[in-house]
Image (cartoon, rainbow, N blue to C red):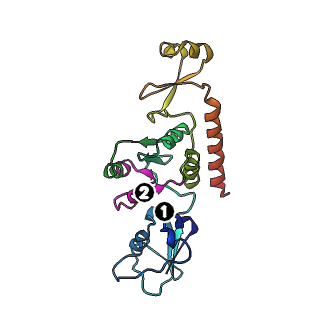
Amino acid sequence: MLHFAPELRMFLPANRRRGPQRVALDGTSTLGHLVESLGVPLPEVGPLTVNGARVDPSHHPAPGDVIEVAAVPRPQPVPLEPGQTAPRFLLDVHLGTLARRMRLLGLDTVYHNDMDDPALVEQANAERRVLLTQDRGLLRRRKLWLGAYVRGSKPDDQLRDLLERFAPPLRPWSRCTACNGLLAEVDKTDVEPLLEAGTRRTYDVYGRCRDCGQVYWRGAHGEHLARIVDAAQATVSAARAGV
């Protein structure tokens, strides 16, 4: 009998979201296989216990076992490579708006709208990026080193979910929202030929992407973006404090 944490019941079939789950055992399936057969991707699963004892997903349950399936803890630690100070992310085709908001916050975020699932997994593994997706099948690929299901249909909700889950360090206004490159301050005279006359008259402080050359300034949309940044910083602070 499997008891799923409330946070995981959204992955279960609608007719199985209440109460414990009874499953037939074939003597060969692992606990991880049973959990995923019910629709819950293993990257969303935290500690597993059988009859009160911690076990791995490779454990083979026996008839009569009482199994507790917890959700992954929040904030979730991410293994970092030597010299790396913050998690890196890779987003699939459906999360373009979220990718731009993450870059606004200074998160190292790669996004593709033309890459298939095997290629996404390959890049995530090679660059040690957390793969963010709303595709449960993608999260069930055995070769994927680390992935996460993004909850919510609106960008605000998706961003809040991501920040609550990983509580990553933020460096707002440091990355290009178009290509993920780092921004550098530039003199106005260096970019004047690229600006509209009204922009030249109104603004004096500019940044430019070191990779693609995109020019940035605090325009009319600046207040809206600042609200996104302020809300994100508050969310991360609350997540780290366990609020």
Magenta residues, start to end: 123-151
Q: Compared to 119, does 217 lie above or below?
A: above
Q: Residues within 10 Å of mark 1 (few under 14, many from 20)?
A: some
Q: Are marks 2 and 1 in contact (CB under 8 Å)?
A: no
List the residue tagged with mark 2.
146
The answer to which image quadrant residue 62 occupies is bottom left
| Amino acid type, callout 1 | Glu
Point 68% across, 57% down: residue: 243
Q: Position of residue 56 (x, y in %)?
A: 43, 73
Point 57% across, 42% down: residue: 170
Q: Position of residue 242 (x, y in %)?
A: 65, 58
The answer to which image quadrant residue 228 occupies is top right
List the residue tagged with mark 1.
44
The span from disc 2 to disc 1 (Cα, nearest Å) is: 10 Å
Point 44% across, 64% down: residue: 41
> In this rendering, would 99 be left or right of 241?
left
Say whether disc 2 or disc 1 marks the residue closer to the N-terminus: 1
Q: Residues within 10 Å of mark 2 (few under 14, many from 20)?
A: some
Q: Compared to 106, does 29 lie above or below?
A: below
